[in-house]
Image (cartoon, helix red, strand yellow):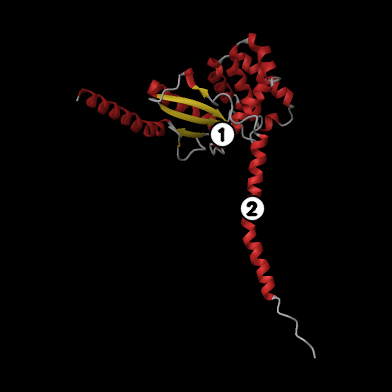
Amino acid sequence: MWLSPPNTDWLIGLRRLRVKMLRPAILQLVALLVLVVFFSASGDYIPPSKLDGFVYENHSFDFDSILIEAFYDPVCPDSRDSWPPLKQALHHYGSRVSLVVHLLPLPYHDNAFVASRALHIVNTLNASATFPFLEWLFKHQEKFYGAQTRNLTRVSIVEEIVKSAAKVLGSSYYNSIQNGFNDTKTDYLTRVSFKYAASRGVYGTPFFYVNGFLLPDTGAAVDYNTWRKVIDPLVGAKKSSKSEESLHFFL
């Protein structure tokens, strides 16, 4: 008498169910391991001893002012195009608006890391020259990315940037700027800038935050009229708030 083989469909279904139930747990474990590796490797850089960023015109931070945070890549054309209207807005509002520039050297922009590192070097040597040098880099971007640099070595690019920075700071700074590229501290500061931008969810340039909130439609140049539309209501709100405080004081 032949016995029919047992029906194993339910066993197969049970195994598939177990795999389906375990899959999310496995993915979570993998994600946890990735985070552990990331933060272990980043332990030397996060958190830094000093807040990242360059303060425009060396203004001291004031909670009563409107804070704009700009994330720039010094060899990004959109960053370059966004700077003149932002600068115009800053001069219009004066002390009512503060600006901090953070650097995000994008990996798909040639020599972005070297240029960003040069800005950190300049800022360390003479903070008042940081923005003039940033403007110089914006003006001469074509020298540091694209087809013009395809056959150039990193050493020659660094040498050209050192010469350029010395033009802005003064020839007496030449050796100090050159030595800055041999100082691991400047490499550290540039990596901190990249990691800080990533921690804020920034993935392109330019990105703008106003009082800690992301400005919509970032990743492209913002014109002067748009800045006025963003900032005017905030300035008006501050005036109203101060008027109310004065009224309550006299009452």
The quadrant of the image that shows the N terminus is bottom right
Q: Is residue 77 left or right of residue 33?
A: left
Q: Is residue 219 left or right of residue 178?
A: left
Residue ID at (45%, 37%): 215
Residue ID at (58%, 36%): 198
Q: Amino acid at mark 1?
A: Ala
- Determine the secondary structure under disc 1: helix
**Location of residue 195 by image quarter:** top right
Residue ID at (73%, 80%): 6
Q: Look at the image and tell me whether residue 33 can be seen.
A: yes
Location of residue 166 with respect to 200 vertically, above or below? above
* Residue 215 - label: none
Q: Which residue is mark 1?
A: 197
Q: Position of residue 20 (x, y in %)?
A: 63, 62
Q: Which residue is mark 2?
A: 27
For discs 1 and 2, the disc positioned in front in the rendered view: 2
Q: Amino acid at mark 2?
A: Leu
Q: Look at the image and tell me whether residue 75 can be seen.
A: no
Query: Alpha-carbon neighbours of circle 1 within 10 Å: few (<14), some, or many (≥20)?
Result: many
Q: Position of residue 111 (x, y in %)?
A: 66, 29
Q: Is residue 233 left or right of residue 23?
A: left
Residue ID at (65%, 39%): 38
CB contact under 8 Å: marks 1 and 2: no
Q: Position of residue 156 (x, y in %)?
A: 73, 23
Comparing 194 with 177, the one in front is: 194
Q: Position of residue 223 (x, y in %)?
A: 44, 32
- Determine the secondary structure under disc 2: helix
The quadrant of the image that shows the C terminus is top left
**Location of residue 65 by image quarter:** top left
Query: Alpha-carbon neighbours of circle 2 within 10 Å: few (<14), some, or many (≥20)?
Result: few
